[in-house]
Amino acid sequence: MQVPLLNALRTFTVSAQRLNFTKAAEDLLVSPSAVSHQVKVLEEYLGCKLFLRKNRSLELTDKGQFLFDRLQRPFYEINQALSELRMPHGKSRINLSLRPFVSSMWFTGQLGDFWLKHPDIEINLLHRLQAPDFFRDNINFAIVWGKQGDWPQLQTLRIIPGNLTPVCAPSYLKMHGKIESAADLNQHVLIHEENQLCWEQWLRKAAGQELTAKKGFHIDDTNVRMNAVLNGQGVMLGCPALLKPMLEKQEIVQLFDVYLDEYAYFLAYPKEANISSQEQEFIDWVASIAIR
């Protein structure tokens, strides 16, 4: 069976994922002009436009979206087949994307149990802050952070409750004084994630107040946020289930018993994925170590 313009189809798929020829070129290790040329060849072959080209971005046309929806799974399955054939007979590899913090504070500590029970399955951890792209990066599973329903295209399993609540180091309280009420936090240094949404939600829930704190900064990596907290630089929203060892050692202090309990960590994978028996074993194992 002949598949015409296979390279152009792959180039189109990556471009549709990125919606940017320059970023697609970086993924494909070619020049942006080469990406643009391949897309143009494909558009001429099909006799239709696949992208609407704007000043600094791309947008899929209806036909482009149709083609992209049909191509994602075949390329994913090709990558899976090649990956399986490269493994020794009887073994399999699972690529798992997750944030560095949940990996260092919880997941990697559990792997000894998995390897003992499943020596024929190799786990490849991919640490990143960005949302996973299962098809482009050949990822089988991801541990993602958010709310139930945030990923309608994914199958999800809740594995760690978020229960976000303010924490800080004893040294911060020693320097700035005891924090008597939730409303007092607006007078302190608040350490934010990529945005201020969680702090806004927590203050509204705990104190019925809007976020007005003038002192604070943003850090996208939770490991770095935690280091800032341990150094007495401010107050962050943390997940008690992951921070339990630090709380027990009194390296950090939980300030209140008010939680944003709609957030959690989830194991996620594409709904259309054909789950192998070994992948199902991995899902079952993750479910067995989930924190309830």
Image: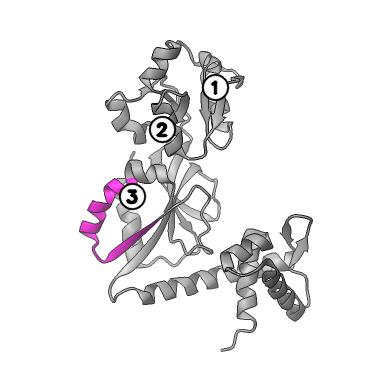
Q: Earlier in the sequence, mark 2 or mark 3?
A: 2
Q: Residue at x 33, y 47 (%)?
A: 107
In this figure, which residue is indicated by the disc labeled 1? 203
Let me know if residue 102 appears in the view: yes
Neighbour tally class for label 3: few under 14, some 14-19, many 20 plus, Cα within 10 Å? some
Residue 170 found in image quarter:
top left
Q: Position of residue 44 (x, y in %)?
A: 77, 78
Q: Nearer the viewer, mark 1 or mark 3?
A: 1
- Give the numbered dot on residue 227: 2
Q: Amino acid at mark 3?
A: Ala
Which of the two labelled residues, at mark 2 and mark 1, occupies the earlier sequence position?
A: 1
| Marker disc for residue 48 | none
Name the kind of residue labelled 2 in the image: Asn
Element assignment for label 1: helix
Residue bearing the label numbered 3: 287
Q: Is residue 125 left or right of residue 155?
A: left
Q: Quadrant of the C terminus?
A: top left
